[in-house]
């Protein structure tokens, strides 16, 4: 099969296109022929070495497609079934052998392309807004990188749950997209100090919760945007790792809560993965959540996709097509 491999960490050029043996499913695995593969920011951390993975590796944590074969112990899936997965490494390929317990069935009303676009960022949005901090009616919510993949989904969910949504973005085009997704206020944090702006927008009261996937460049400011006893959900670092800091700072700034959640801890059990996926697919099927597919690129152009994502040139989702 054709696949992308990383043999050495480094810049986007380290993503090498070539031939690999077709995977053979173990007894508890399913062989999936990919229809579409999701690009995610975490893929750049694996490629750059920010997160360590054993090499060589076929990167990628999200795809959807059809079952072509199933191992001897698999009873839930049969050839022809439409399935999707996330958090199993090896998606940047034509085929993957995936443990059956990590697969979910894709409803026809959703389809495999939307499922590939939604599994990682959509499930992240689900757990962040329903479980990590269950957003309530009337909350004021700050969402950084509000026109990004996770950002546009967070804005829609927060709005639907009755929050007042403040987003940050870097450009006018991204501001427009964040507003279309439902943001009440949008701050261009590359031009203005977002802490001052949030203060002015909230009568110096601050927000109940800040969703911060940007990390290094926003983290300290995010703490200053919270109400007393508010929560900073630090879920990523597209601008680089957050510097170490003393927990006493959380006391000084108003008994704040800080969490650094990861998707895998919210979908580890198959029952929880399926329950969240079913709810996510229902939102999509009912039109309660819209996906913005920024572009589709051939899988062979994964390096270009990484350059665009790291260069802040994408909005919403980028799909790689095998
Ligand atoms: P995005 O589509 O949001 O892309 C990243 C965005 O970050 C950019 O578009 C840009 O938006 C913003 N950004 C700010 N500063 C920088 C910088 N210096 N370099 C690059 N980008 C910058 O990516 P994803 O939706 O895939 O992921 C968003 C974040 O969420 C990532 O940090 C990712 O790791 C994290 N994540 C965490 C999960 C978890 O469970 N913990 C799961 C999924 C994602 P702008 O130009 O508007 O500033």
Image (cartoon, grey):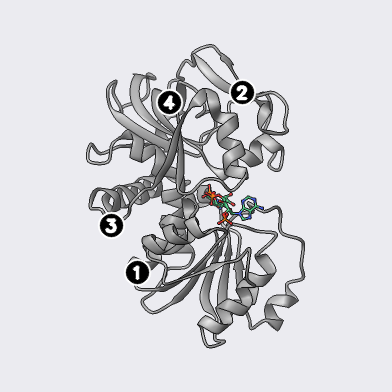
Q: CA distance from mark 4 to mark 1?
A: 39 Å
x and y, in percent, of residue 237 in the image: 64, 54
Q: CA distance from mark 2 to mark 4?
A: 25 Å
Q: Is residue 302 left or right of residue 12?
A: left
Query: Which of pointers 2 and 4 lies earlier in the amino acid sequence?
Result: 2
Query: Which of pointers 2 and 3 lies earlier in the amino acid sequence?
Result: 2
Residue shown at the point (39%, 24%) measured from the top left? 32
Find residue 5 and name its label: 2
Query: Which of pointers 4 and 3 lies earlier in the amino acid sequence?
Result: 4
x and y, in percent, of residue 230 in the image: 55, 77
- For label 2, the SS is strand
- For label 1, the SS is loop
Residue shown at the point (70%, 59%) measured from the top left? 216
Q: How many marks?
A: 4
Query: Which of pointers 3 and 1 lies earlier in the amino acid sequence?
Result: 1
Tag 4 residue:
28
Query: Which of pointers 4 and 1 lies earlier in the amino acid sequence?
Result: 4
Using a 10 Å C-alpha cutoff, classify the residue at mark 1 as few (fewer than 14 neighbours), some (14 to 19) or many (20 or more): some
Q: Nearer the viewer, mark 4 or mark 3?
A: 3
Tag 3 residue:
288
Q: Is residue 75 left or right of residue 33?
A: left
Tag 1 residue:
161
Discs 4, 3 touching: Cβ within 8 Å: no
Q: Is residue 286 left or right of residue 44?
A: left
x and y, in percent, of residue 175 in the image: 48, 61
Q: CA distance from mark 4 to mark 3?
A: 35 Å
């Amino acid at each position: 099969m054709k696949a992308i491999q990383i043999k050495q960490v480094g810049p986007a050029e380290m993503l090498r296109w070539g031939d690999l043996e077709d995977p053979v499913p173990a007894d508890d695995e399913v062989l999936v022929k990919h229809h579409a593969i999701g690009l995610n920011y975490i893929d750049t951390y694996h490629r750059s070495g920010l997160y360590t993975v054993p090499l060589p590796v076929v990167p990628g944590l999200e795809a959807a497609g059809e079952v072509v074969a199933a191992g001897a112990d698999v009873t839930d899936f049969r050839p022809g079934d439409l399935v999707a997965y996330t958090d199993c490494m090896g998606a940047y390929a034509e085929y993957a052998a995936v443990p059956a317990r990590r697969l979910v069935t894709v409803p026809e009303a959703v389809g495999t392309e939307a499922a590939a676009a939604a599994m990682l960022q959509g499930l992240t949005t689900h757990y962040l807004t329903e479980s990590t901090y269950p957003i309530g009616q009337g909350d004021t919510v700050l969402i950084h990188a509000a026109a990004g993949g996770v950002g546009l989904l967070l804005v829609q969910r927060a709005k639907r749950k009755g929050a007042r949504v403040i987003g940050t973005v870097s450009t006018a085009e991204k501001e427009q997209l964040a507003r279309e997704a439902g943001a009440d206020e949008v701050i261009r944090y590359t031009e203005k100090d977002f802490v001052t702006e949030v203060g002015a927008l909230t009568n110096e009261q601050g927000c109940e919760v800040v969703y911060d996937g940007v990390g290094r460049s926003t983290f300290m400011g995010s703490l200053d945007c919270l109400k007393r006893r508010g929560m900073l959900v630090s879920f990523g670092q597209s601008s680089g790792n957050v510097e170490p800091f003393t927990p006493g700072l959380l006391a000084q700034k108003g008994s704040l809560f800080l969490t650094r959640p990861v998707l895998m801890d919210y979908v580890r059990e198959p029952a929880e993965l399926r329950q969240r996926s079913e709810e996510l697919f229902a939102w999509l099927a009912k039109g309660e959540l819209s996906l913005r597919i920024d572009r589709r690129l051939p899988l062979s152009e994964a390096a270009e996709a990484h350059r665009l994502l790291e260069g802040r040139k994408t909005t919403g989702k980028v799909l790689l097509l095998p």
